[in-house]
Amino acid sequence: MKTRKNLFHLFSLFLLVSMVLVACAPAATEPPHTEAPHTEEPSELVAAAQAEGTLTTIALPHDWCNYGEVIEAFKSKYGLEVNELNPDAGSGDEIEAVKANKDNKGPQAPDVVDVGFGFGPQLVDEGITQPYKVSSWDTIPADLKDPDGYWYGDYYGVLGFEVATDFVTNVPRTWADLLKPEYKGQVALAGDPRTSNQAIQAVNAAALAMGGSFEDPTPGLEFFKQLNDAGNFVPVIAKAATIASGETPIVIRWDYLALTDRDTFAGNPNIEFVVPEEAQPVAGVYLQGVSAYAPQPNAAKLWMEFLYSDEGQLLWLKGYCHPIRYNDLVARNAIPADLAAALPPAEPYAKAVYPTIDQLSAAKAIVTENWDSVVGADVK
């Protein structure tokens, strides 16, 4: 399995260059400075996908990266149906769904996956995905895609605290704050750390704050044990409904999900997103891939073409997810000014830590294997 030894340095450079370009962007959208990349899907692929008639997705909540609008736009553009499986599944659940249905050509077999960066090696090693290179392949940074096309980065963000301030009087500013008695029964994760990339990354982030590392996330597990023993941890997978009701008023999750909730709730309740102060924020990339056993392989490939077109990338950005072709979009002046203005401040992103795929794989194994024995909280 090929690894990505230089991911941290290259991706940090990629991000910093992006921010400089954004700062220098004009106030209004102008014609592209350079010719747009070829992102038109072949007519033969469109016809073949329409003959299949349906795309089956999994683990795509509508409030995650604006996937609700993305799915509707895809359906409207191509006239395909989209069969949505288990929107709240974690990355590990997606992989298991593909494996469990590899001989099943029915509606329970996913055509595509969207998983955390640390799951990339598993996609290849276990034959979960098949190679496919989208038309805009050359504009995806080299260290954020498998060279043979088995997976490719799709978007990224940073972790922090989503706080429903109608239920939380004093907003926590650090990881250590979460251990205070005033937060009893209030702190939750947005996934199961035994299967969810987002939750695993939350443990990694806590580990960094507690003096650990991606290679040794044990301090993060110990932190969540303290949180659980104190009665502050709520073993519920937080969703918009549990946040709005006050059941999980403090959630450790990606920035784009918190910012989407802030807009969607429109003050009922009020939402504040906090990047913890005592450690560098952890940033995370997610990956796309076409299932090796896709019942509708042409619809799956057409979905990828749509996601990696300018249209699809801008729809992700509208949901506060920085798309993987962000650098290219900025360079060509392809981001509308109002969309660029809606993005959060650049400072947290400039300080963020981007773990390598090897680090994520190592941390994933430690967290998933030791959560039950160390923390002892059955998250569901």
Image (cartoon, rainbow, N blue to C red):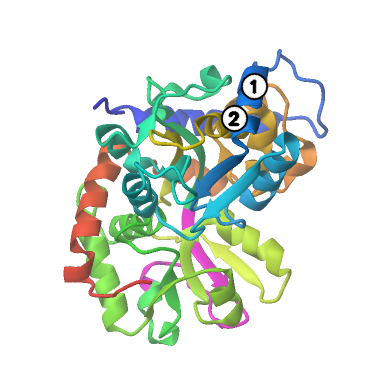
Q: Is the magenta stretch mostly helix, strand or loop?
A: loop
Q: Name the residue under label 2.
A: 302
Label 2 CA crowd tier, 10 Å (few <14, some 14–19, many 20+): many
Disc on res. 41: 1
Residue 369: image quadrant is bottom left
The image shows residue 350, relative to residue 233, as above or below, that is above
- Residue 320 visible in this rendered orientation of the protein: no
- Residue 78 visible in this rendered orientation of the protein: yes
Where is residue 90 drawn, in percent x and y?
40, 56
Q: In which quarter of the image is the N terminus?
A: top left
Q: What range is drawn magenta here?
A: 159-176
Is 319 in the magenta? no
Please state which of residues 292 and 317 is positioned toward the viewer in this rendering: 292
The residue positioned 64% from the left and 28% from the top of the image is 309
Q: Is residue 100 left or right of residue 259?
A: left
Label 1 CA crowd tier, 10 Å (few <14, some 14–19, many 20+): some
Residue 303: image quadrant is top right
